[in-house]
Every structure is written in structure tokens, then in C-alpha cells.
């Protein structure tokens, strides 16, 4: 099974993947941005992911997306792809999973995560290793709305199902509760698919 996990930066996708790995250590977890970064380093000397959208011309960015998709699609077994439905570029939104990319990935599921914008902003503040633009709650909310549109468009092109885990207005009762819930959901999708194949 191939699951594409999409959410804004600061949504805790890495934490979710770590919980999934604990439950299903044989699942391959691939960060789409990391694969793109390795290609961009080799071709353009880019140093970090946040630089890619600012320094690489759009036509070259597209080629990097496609090369990354082909690599990920070739991976065997159950694969979870950590990526974005849309990327903010020059004040607008660029598709993270355009038709030419999603048709190469061929995921079974696109899983979209949504959170209260203030929670995303707080998580971003605690991640000093990234060089993100500072956004208001309204801008984060607008980006999440754009993500929904892009996720459904990608699912249509890739003939995938869309699942939405919406944590808006659902405060955590303990640290990492949302991440654990999301990881459980992902693990159950994979286990259900495995049972159907056996």
C-alpha cells in the first residue's frame, strides 16, 4: 500500500511517522522534500529545503518533483510518503502533487491532516532548524483550505481515495495525542489492506 500523508509544515508529520514506525517497523517512510533536496543539492547546490522554492526556477522545480516521484514509486512494499498538497511560492500556492507527479506515484490513499492554525504556528516556533516564512493564523488557515482543494484534485488525477483527519477545535488532553491518533489511523489503513490481500 502507498499512502501520501499531506499537511502544512509544523503539523507534526515527522512525529506521526515515528509512531507509525514503532508499530510497523517494516513500512518504508519517505520524505518527499528530502528526496527532492538530494536531487536539488546535486543539480543546483541548494543547502536546505526551504531554499528550493525561492531559488530554483519553476520549470526546474517541476523536473525535480518528477524525478523524486519516479524514485519513490519504485520502492517496494508498504510506503508512506510525507509531503505537501501545496507549497507557498511567491505569494501563491503551487501544487505539491500535480497530475504529472501523482500519476507517477499512484498512491492508494491521500491522507490530509488539518489543525488549528495557532497550533501549527506554535510548533513552527519550536523548530529552529527550518527557515520558514512567518505566517499569520489567517494565512495558515487559507493554506489549509488550499490543501483540501489540491488533495482532492490530486486524488482525482491519481484515482486515489482522500481521507481527512481534522483536529481543528480538538485540543490535546496530553502531549502528542494528535500524532498518536494519526499514526494509529495510518497503521490501521495498512493493516486492513494487508488483511484483504491475505
Image (cartoon, rainbow, N blue to C red):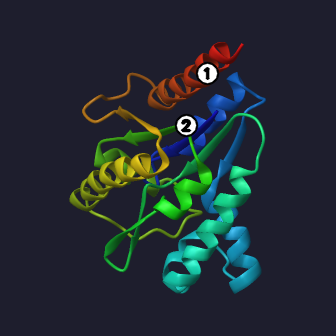
Q: Nearer the viewer, residue 129 or 165?
A: 165
Q: Which mark is residue 108?
A: 2
How far from the left and from the top, in percent, is residue 57? 52, 86
For the residue labelled by badge 1, is the local secondary structure a helix, a strand or a loop?
Answer: helix
Rendered position, 148 above or below 130: above
How far from the left and from the top, in percent, is residue 174? 44, 24
For the residue labelled by badge 2, is the local secondary structure a helix, a strand or a loop?
Answer: loop
Quarter of the image where the C terminus is located? top right
Quarter of the image where the N terminus is located? top right
How far from the left and from the top, in percent, is residue 58? 49, 82
Q: Which of 118 and 164 is in front in this view?
A: 164
Which residue is at 41% across, 40% downward? Answer: 113
145 sits left or right of 153 in the view: left
Task: Please identify the quarter of the rendering in which residue 161 is found.
Answer: top left
Rendered position, 175 above or below 90: above
- Counting other residues with Cα less than 10 Å from the Cα at mark 2, is it few (<14), some (14-19), or many (20 or more)? some
Rendered position, 49 above or below 127: below
How far separated are the C-alphas under marks 1 and 2? 10 Å
Which residue is at 33% across, 34% downward? Answer: 166
Which residue is at 73% across, 58% downward? Answer: 71
109 sits left or right of 169 in the view: right
Which residue is at 59% across, 17% downward? Answer: 192
For the residues bearing labels 1 and 2, Cβ distance under 8 angstroms: yes
Q: Residue 78 carries which label?
A: none
The earlier-in-sequence mark between 1 and 2 is: 2
- Counting other residues with Cα less than 10 Å from the Cα at mark 1, is it few (<14), some (14-19), or many (20 or more)? few
How far from the left and from the top, in percent, is residue 175? 48, 29
26 sits left or right of 88 in the view: right
Task: Please identify the quarter of the rendering in which residue 34 is found.
Answer: bottom right
The residue that label 1 is drawn on is 193
Amino acid at each position: 500500500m502507498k499512502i501520501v500523508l499531506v499537511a502544512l509544515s509544523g503539523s507534526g508529520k515527522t512525529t506521526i511517522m515515528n509512531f507509525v514506525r514503532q508499530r510497523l517497523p517494516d513500512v518504508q517512510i519517505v520524505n518527499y522534500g528530502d528526496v527532492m533536496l538530494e536531487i536539488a543539492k546535486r543539480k543546483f547546490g541548494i543547502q536546505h529545503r526551504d531554499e528550493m522554492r525561492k531559488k530554483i526556477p519553476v520549470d526546474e522545480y517541476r523536473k525535480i518533483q518528477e524525478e523524486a516521484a519516479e524514485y519513490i514509486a519504485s520502492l517496494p512494499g508498504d510506503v508512506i510518503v510525507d509531503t505537501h498538497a501545496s507549497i507557498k511560492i511567491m505569494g501563491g500556492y503551487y501544487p505539491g502533487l500535480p497530475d504529472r507527479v501523482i500519476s507517477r506515484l499512484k498512491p492508494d490513499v491521500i491522507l490530509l491532516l488539518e489543525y488549528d492554525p495557532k497550533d501549527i504556528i506554535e510548533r513552527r516556533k519550536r523548530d529552529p532548524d527550518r527557515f520558514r516564512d512567518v505566517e499569520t493564523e489567517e494565512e495558515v488557515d487559507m493554506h489549509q483550505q488550499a490543501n483540501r482543494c489540491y488533495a482532492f484534485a490530486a486524488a482525482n488525477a491519481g484515482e486515489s481515495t482522500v481521507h481527512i483527519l481534522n483536529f481543528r477545535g480538538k485540543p490535546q488532553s496530553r502531549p502528542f495525542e494528535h500524532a498518536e491518533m494519526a499514526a494509529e489511523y495510518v497503521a490501521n489503513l495498512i493493516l486492513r489492506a494487508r488483511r484483504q490481500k491475505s
